[in-house]
Amino acid sequence: MYDHKKLSNQLETLSNNNMNAKKPIRIVVLGQCGVGKTALVSRCLQNTFPQDSSSGKDISHRYNMTINKKKTVCLDIVDFNDKNDALISCADAFIICYAINDRKSFEAIDAYLDKIVEANIKSPKIGIVGNKIDLYNDREVTSTEGLELAKEINSLFYETSAKVPVIDVRQVFYDLYQSKER
Ligand SMILES: Nc1nc2c(ncn2[C@@H]2O[C@H](COP(=O)(O)OP(=O)(O)O)[C@@H](O)[C@H]2O)c(=O)[nH]1
Ligand SMILES: [Mg+2]
């Protein structure tokens, strides 16, 4: 059957794209290998969970996002693989991921914060993301610990799962965009 509602949503997205899209904001996704960066980016862009995400490359995606039928925002999302630190210095905002079932990945956040400081970016916006909450039975990092860290560095904080999308991960990217705009 012909889906009028879907089509009108698509048209709305298209017209928003034309009218409201501004200069993209570049969001670099940082975090230790294996925390789920590529999976989170894929969940954001395609709403899928990749079976094999081990490309090992730094990949940049240009993405126009409309959320809650509000305005469209244009993002450059960089899936960072510790290959090219120069990518950090041209970022507007960062997502730093860890896996809630891997304390080492949480401890690794400090090193990424150092890289951001070294890059000398003017008021960088940061979102701390504890991924893999579907594995809560193996939790090694409490929500409170994540939250405390986020408070300390004045960043946003989320717990997510790229595998079982309990929250819409696009919200993380969208909130960062908004905090950058302010
Ligand atoms: N259970 C679970 N596994 C995940 C999640 N996100 C990623 N993974 C798995 O963790 C591994 C590393 O994910 P990947 O996206 O390649 O991590 P990256 O190295 O940070 O890019 C892969 O086997 C993924 O399938 C998640 O939210 N839950
Ligand atoms: Mg990856």
Image (cartoon, helix red, strand yellow):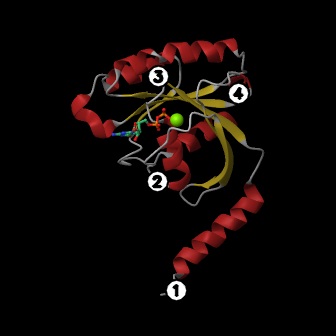
Q: Residues within 10 Å of mark 2 (few under 14, many from 20)?
A: some
Residue 93 versus residue 28: which sits nearer the camera? Answer: 28
Locate ligand 1 by image quadrant: top left
Residue under pointer 1: 2
Residue under pointer 3: 150
Q: Residues within 10 Å of mark 4 (few under 14, many from 20)?
A: some
Label 4 SS: helix
Residue under pointer 2: 48
Residue 56 got which mark?
Answer: none
Measured along the vertical axis of the image, is residue 141 above or below residue 12?
Answer: above
Amino acid found under the numbered disc labelled 4: Leu
Mark earlier in primary sequence (1, 2): 1
Residue 87 got which mark?
Answer: 4
Mark 2 and mark 3 residues within 8 Å of each other at the beta carbon? no
Instruction: Answer with left or right where residue 125 lies relative to residue 109.
Output: right
Measured along the vertical axis of the image, is residue 1 above or below residue 125?
Answer: below
Residue 123 versus residue 166: which sits nearer the camera? Answer: 166
Amino acid found under the numbered disc labelled 2: Thr
